[in-house]
Structure formats: C-alpha cells, structure tokens
Image: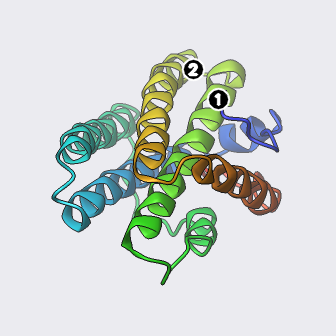
C-alpha cells in the first residue's frame, strides 16, 4: 500500500520485547509529536478550510492515541519517561524543500507527514504480527488502521495542493530517501529506531 522501499525486519520485535517500557514511552511521544505537527500545519495554513477541518480531527486522534499509550504504560505499573529525540524524523525533516515557495513547502510538509505515518503504520503491522504480548498485538493492530488513514489524508492533501504529476514524482523521491534513512535504523526499541 505505501510502496516503502525497505520493510522492517521482523527481528526488530525481539529488540522491542526486551524493553517494552521504552517502546511504549517512545510511542507515546511519537503520538504527541504527530498531534503537534497537525496543529502546526493548521497554524501555517488557516485558509485551507478542508485541510484545517481534517487535520484538527487527526490532532485529536493523535492525542487520544497518546492517552491510550499512556494508559497502557500505567496499567503495566510503569511511568511515562521523558520525551525522546526522534533521529529518524529529524533526518526526514532535512529533506523538506525550503525556499521554493509556500505552496511547494506545504506539499513537502504533507509528504513528510505521510511518510512518517506510512512507516509508523508499517512498524505497527510488524508489531501486531510478531509481538508475543497478545494485548499489545491487538493494540497495535487497531492503531495500524488509524495510521493508514492518516497517511491517506496527508498524501491526498499533497496531491490536492500540488501540481499534477509533480506530487507523485516527489513522493517517489521521498520513498527513495526514506529507504536510505531507515536502513540505518531498526536496532533499538523505538518506533522508528
């Protein structure tokens, strides 16, 4: 569905299972950052009413996911750790075209968000299929569906606001770049790590 060029090795789940409090803390902060990103796009482009409406829904969903992950942490007797730096996302951010006009910047911001949602969804699928913890497997299966919907929304708005044909070409560039970036990850108990 996402045409990711490099899929996650299922053995990554073995790393995750070695430190469940860490993956859940990292995941919680990923959800908070996703909500903040949606809000940032709303603030930057308030005149795009359809996008504002849909992204406000996504921001609420992402905060709800944060709350669900936090509840999972508490239910297991753990505590949410401090915010984690997401090197994967920071590397992707560098690929956003800057200085090429507000519309082109918006399209790249939307593709950036779509890329993160696509990889998160793919990672949640791997977790849902390979983690031994049945409660977490079910939890990640449910979240996978939501992340796929978010991916579709961001990609759809990029296509709506971009020049016909150019967005698909740029998405292919994003996919190739992301494959380079993700090839350096998958060795830690982080959603993108």
The quadrant of the image that shows the C terminus is bottom right
Q: Position of residue 115 (x, y in %)?
A: 58, 49
In which quadrant of the rendered view does residue 157 lie?
Answer: top left
- Front residue of 95/19: it is 95
The answer to whether residue 184 is left or right of residue 96 is right
**Mark 2: few, some, or many residues within 10 Å (few <14, many ≥20)?**
some
Tell me if label 2 and label 1 are in contact, CB under 8 Å. Answer: yes
Which residue is most to the front?
164
Task: Tell me, yes or no, if residue 83 can be seen here.
Answer: no
- Front residue of 160/19: it is 160
Secondary structure of residue under mark 1: helix
Q: How far apart, in angstroms, are the residues tagged by discs 2 and 1? A: 6 Å
The quadrant of the image that shows the N terminus is top right
Q: Residue drawn at (16%, 59%), measured in percent from left and top?
A: 46
In which quadrant of the rendered view does residue 56 lie?
Answer: top left
The answer to whether residue 37 is left or right of residue 179 is left
- Front residue of 15/144: it is 144
Q: Residue drawn at (32%, 42%), measured in percent from left and top?
A: 62
Residue 137 badge: 2
The answer to whether residue 110 is left or right of residue 189 is left
Q: Is residue 184 above or below residue 96?
A: above
Q: Position of residue 152 (x, y in %)?
A: 48, 33
Q: Residue drawn at (24%, 62%), measured in percent from left and top?
A: 45
Task: Tell me, yes or no, if residue 148 can be seen here.
Answer: yes
Secondary structure of residue under mark 2: helix
Q: How is the image coloured?
A: rainbow
Please give the residue where the numbered disc 1 appears in the rendered image.
127
In which quadrant of the rendered view does residue 185 lie?
Answer: bottom right
Mark 2 vs mark 1: which is more N-terminal? 1
Q: Position of residue 15 (x, y in %)?
A: 74, 44
The answer to whether residue 161 is left or right of residue 94 is left
């Amino acid at each position: 569905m996402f045409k990711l060029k490099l899929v996650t090795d299922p053995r990554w789940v073995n790393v995750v299972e070695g430190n469940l409090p860490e993956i859940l803390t990292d995941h919680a902060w990923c959800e908070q950052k996703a909500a903040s990103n949606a809000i940032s796009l709303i603030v930057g482009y308030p005149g795009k009413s359809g996008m504002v409406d849909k992204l406000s829904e996504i921001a609420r969903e992402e905060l709800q996911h944060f709350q669900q992950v936090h509840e999972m942490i508490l239910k297991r007797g753990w505590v949410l750790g401090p915010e984690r730096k997401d090197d994967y996302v920071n590397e992707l951010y560098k690929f956003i075209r800057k200085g090429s006009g507000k519309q082109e910047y918006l399209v790249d911001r939307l593709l950036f968000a779509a890329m993160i949602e696509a990889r998160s969804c793919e990672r949640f699928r791997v977790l849902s299929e390979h983690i031994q913890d049945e409660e977490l497997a079910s939890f990640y299966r449910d979240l996978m569906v939501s992340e796929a919907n978010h991916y579709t929304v961001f990609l759809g708005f990029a296509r709506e606001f971009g020049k016909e044909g150019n967005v698909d070409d740029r998405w292919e560039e994003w996919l190739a770049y992301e494959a380079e970036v993700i090839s350096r990850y998958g060795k830690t108990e982080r959603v993108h790590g």
